[in-house]
Image (cartoon, rainbow, N blue to C red):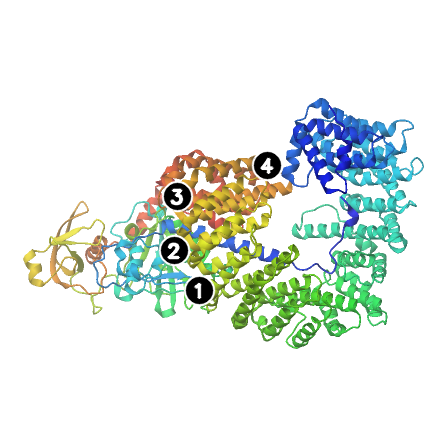
Amino acid sequence: MAPNELHRLYKRPPISDQQKRRELSLRRQEQSRRDAQLQARRLASTLFSLSSSQTLEETSEPDIDLVSEPQPDFQPENESVSSPSDLDLDVRQASKLRGSEARKWFARQLMLPEWMIDVPDRLSHDWLATRSYITTDSRQRNCQCHHFPRLCPACLTASGSCQSYSILDCIFHEMDQTYYVIDMICWRGYSLYDCTAEFRFFWLNSKLAETGACDPPSQYHRYRFSLVPIYTCDQSGLHSAYAGAVPYVKDGLLFYNKHAHYQPGNTPLALVWKDENCSQYVIDTDSKGQVPSQQQVVLELLHDGKLITSDDPPVVFGFLELEFTQKSGLHPGNLLRFSIGNGGLHTVDGKLEKADLHYFGKSNRARAFADSYSKIMFQYSVRHSPLRIDDLVASISSSDDEGNGPSDVEMAV
Amino acid sequence: MAMEITQFLLAAQSADARVRTEAESTLRQFQEQNLPGFLLSLSVELANNEKPPESRRLAGIVLKNSLDAKDAVTKERLAQQWMAIDISIKSQIKDFLLRTLGSHVPEARHTSAQVIAKIASIEIPQKQWPDLIGILLKNMTLKDSPAGLRQATLETLGYVCEEISHRELEQAEVNDVLTAVVQGMNLAENNAEVRLAATRALYNALDFAETNFQNEMERNYIMKMVCETAMSKEIEIRQAAFECLVSIASTYYEVLEPYMQHLFELTSNAVKGDEEPVALQAIEFWSSICDEEIELQEFESENSGESGPPHSCFIEKALSSLVPMLLDTLLKQEEDQDQDDSIWNVSMAGGTCLGLVARTVGDSILPLVMPFVEANILKPDWHCREAATFAFGSILEGPTLDKLSLLVHSGLDFLLRAMRDENNHVKDTTAWTLSRIFELLHSPAAGYSVISSENLQRIVEVLVESIKDAPNVAEKVCGAIYYLAQGYEDAGTSSSLLTPYVPTIIDCLLTTANRTDGGDSKLRSSAYETLNEVVRCSNIAETSQIIAQLLPVIMNKLGQTIELQIVSLDDREKQGDLQASLCGVLQVIIQKLSSMDETKPLILQAADQIMLLFLKVFACRSSTVHEEAMLAIGSLAYATGSEFGKYMPEFYKYLEMGLLNFEEYQVCAITVGVVGDICRALDDKVLPYCDGIMNHLVKDLSSEELHRSVKPPIFSCFGDIALAIGEHFEKYVPYAIQMMQGAAELCARMDTSDDELLEYANQLKRSIFEAYSGILQGFKNSKSEIMLPYAKHLLQFIEMVFREQQRETQRDESVTKAAVAVMGDLADALGPNTKMLFRDLAFYADFLGECLQSEDEQLKETATWTQGMIGRVMVS
């Protein structure tokens, strides 16, 4: 080494813009790589297929929000709209669907709770409770896809390339112009589809607040988002869920099995329960908002005249003669409304044996699905021998008394 | 076995090209046919005092070049070649070399010393030359050994210390070497030649003296000898001694306290009265002390609470004497020092040191410097005005914003007026000071700026006017504009302030770039680089039209370069430089305009023409690709997305050329990055090119010649390709994975006590994980079973990295992130097949646990995702 040749920087050497450009390019490439890998990671588990079994002409579903970056090079997926049955669309492509196609597609991704007919075992250990105003009344719902530029924090740092999105399961409450988030399916590209409910709620709680989405509306998001409080299903948790004050109109309680993954369609691992204290709509109303004197049910007509529920597999509730269907101009796939006569529903060992059904007419065209078995049974029990809050409380205390040790529930929101 | 080669060695230096070529070829033939005999003959030639100095000199040079090379790969090959030679021949050669140290011909001794050190650098780490140090020391202790031998021996010891690490020697050997060297510096016993050699040897041996510097007596002795030597009557010896002091200042800062008073007097006298080479080293001593204290302060502020090495506050204590001494040096400018980059004089070194002092002590420098500034800034002698301005500009970094703002606010107007000073140096330094002010005190985004809507217009007017001044001044003005624009980057509404001036600024920069009086291309490069910063930092919503108009102007200029007449290599180089600047501007414009939906179409519309230009730029050369054009093409691919596919047939050959450019590794690295851009732009449409690309990437990885820094990006690039083409990556899997596994094993073997190697190992690990991630995700939807046989190796590698990362010193968040992500990818892509693997390797739970506790949100998020993926597998 020749130390005497050492020259320190004098009046600063020329700026190395080339080095700067190289570094900026490298950073952009790293960011793009990260985005591409994240994209790959989420696509795996959010790749829902567009079902071909869509027989419904028009649907109306719960609200879904697609929180997405606008896509500069957006090209309408015309093909997919015209022949959805052939396509496995991922969420990104699905976000390009418009109108009723979008509504149908997203509705299929939603987890629909069953109605609580019996208190599940280990309610206090394996379940979480939340106040809900999910109603079965489909007239209140519509689907909106909102684009919220810059809502997701990743997008704040990323340059134009970021197309990260999140899917929230939420309900729009018109009175305070707020989306109440009840579940999170995908967050900034990470699929939470295969995560347990316990984890999803944790994630939901920790992530949503970070984004500022819960802040008052701004130019970045028109509507406020709000979290629905979630409780462990112990005595006090249940009490808070049942009796606590909420800023929205309550409509029953939702119970989630902590270990259950997010599962589109009807699932017994999420349950809805209500009574007069926590819901204005315990007993279904008709189209005029009146409680009919007899319970009404909507069932789907099959080719062979069977009348089935929306469950998978469906439950057969009755049978229509071919002659009758032809005479009434009914077709397979139609949703038909029946009332339950005085003969009621007969079950043996929890299985439906006989139902006293009376044809009422075709269902409202806005209906998407037939009723589920659990809904019919819940409505039936409400009219005859309802499951009361005391029953739930009793179930929890008895389970606590069993001395199963401390609850392993970590979540107490 | 040695041959008589004197005549060939002489002929190889003949003025007659034919004779020369012939002799060179004879020597080469000899070398190729019988390397040991050739090397032996060279050493015989060097050792023989009867031979002419010319042939001995060349023999020494050829011998040295047979043992060492700058390029690491060649160097390694030469070392192995030497080690393969028969031991008896090697010891004969070494004997001849050692014997030459006693020659009465100084040049032969000197060459021999160098060659010995080269052999030592190969053999000592392998314990192949255990008696070397002993033999050299004996030369020193032998009674009545001639001065020439002592001088050459000390020189050899110095070179040996320079070549090898101090870990290669036993402490006893180190002690003996130091004793011999320090005794060699003794004035009473040695002549000047020996003392100079000893002092220079000490410089190289200082790193070896760690233990000795911890011992007070030994340290005192060494310091006493160095300080005495620093007052020798021979200037070269004084300079060498001060060089030792500079090195001691940074290596042994923490033990200097007792000597500082004396060192201050010594350096102070040198700065004031000694000749320039010595004075420069004396100033450098204080700059080194500043470096140390700044580093200590930065360490302290980063690790608040932790006690680092002690801070002795030498600068603070010496401040009141040190600053006046430095200010005095500022008045010793030379005429024309701003025109010649190779000049380094006392005033430049003094000003630079003053800047470091300001960074070390902050506010307390102001009362010492400001009176000097005020006293000199108006004096008729330009030396005074320039020194005052330089002092002011030098202390702008360090003191607090509050104190500086006040001073700068009141001084700014003066400086703007000084841009019309009659003296070139004053204007040069004033423009530089303005650029410092804008760099350090103009940051609207951070909430402070000396520039306001009131003075901005005047500032721009002055800059636009002054840029027409002499080239050296214009270059500094470019710097001022650069930082003026940079301050407005991401500055929200404040950035609108500059918008009205952007067209004028762009115009003046383009005019400056066109100037022909710059002599070299420095001014032009500065003008274009400043233009880039102006474009990059401008408020795109407001300036999109201006930038859109700039695009065709730059394209036109680039088009003109292709028409330039090229007759000489020089012309070719100039053309390349100009194209580099213009491709750079295009790259910045492409990025800027494509960053916003509204302006992106402007790039898409011009993409065909831009690409055509880049292809023409490539065509200007035959064997290499233009680095800047390649860099710009990456941005274009990113902007155009899948549309880029239509350029591929034409562009592909240049892509290949870039990938094959081992020598200019930056070009290769950039091209690898562009492959990634193209993969993401084209997705599976890149497939037709993948055979070729993969082939070249694998070749790159196998090349010993290619700079290692390019290799990690290549692994990442594997991931990019796999992600783009999905299942079609199948055919590349066997050899890609083989490479990845090989690199993983290399990581495990790497010496991580070396910071540089540690950094490299971390890059390599991250990139291997990225490659696996891309491949696994690419196969996820089909054929994922292909990756099953490799899962275990991957998991074991992840475990190894996890264990390493648990050690504080080796931690690198980005590696951890990539490792935890690839674990999730494995579970995600291979599903239930990995259940048994994960069950067997329980470390993953600890790993996830640690990541979930991290404070890094991204890492937590990734770990959570991975946890979900593995959880899904485990319950399946």
Q: Which mark is residue A184?
A: 2
Q: CA distance from mark 1 to mark 4?
A: 46 Å
Q: Amino acid at mark 1?
A: Pro
Circles 2 and 1 in contact, beta carbons < 8 Å: no
The answer to whether one can see residue B546 in this image is yes
Rendered location of residue A308, percent (x, y): 17, 53
SS assignment at label 1: loop
- Reading the image, the residue beneath label 1 is A149
> In the image, is B344 to the left or to the right of A314?
right
Q: Amino acid at mark 3?
A: Ala
Q: Amino acid at mark 2?
A: Met
SS assignment at label 2: strand
Q: CA distance from mark 2 to mark 1?
A: 18 Å
Q: CA distance from mark 2 to mark 4?
A: 44 Å
The answer to whether one can see residue B172 in this image is no
Do the residues indicated by labels 2 and 3 lie within the same chain of the protein?
no
Q: CA distance from mark 1 to mark 3?
A: 31 Å
Do the residues indicated by labels 1 and 4 lie within the same chain of the protein?
no
- Reading the image, the residue beneath label 4 is B750
Do the residues indicated by labels 2 and 4 lie within the same chain of the protein?
no
Q: Amino acid at mark 4?
A: Met
Circles 2 and 3 in contact, beta carbons < 8 Å: no
Chain on which label 4 sits: B
Chain on which label 1 sits: A
Number of other residues with Cα within 10 Å of mark 2, as a class: few under 14, some 14 to 19, many 20 or more: many
Q: CA distance from mark 2 to mark 3?
A: 23 Å
Of B105 and A360, which appears nearest the observer? B105
Circles 2 and 4 in contact, beta carbons < 8 Å: no
Q: Which mark is residue B829?
A: 3
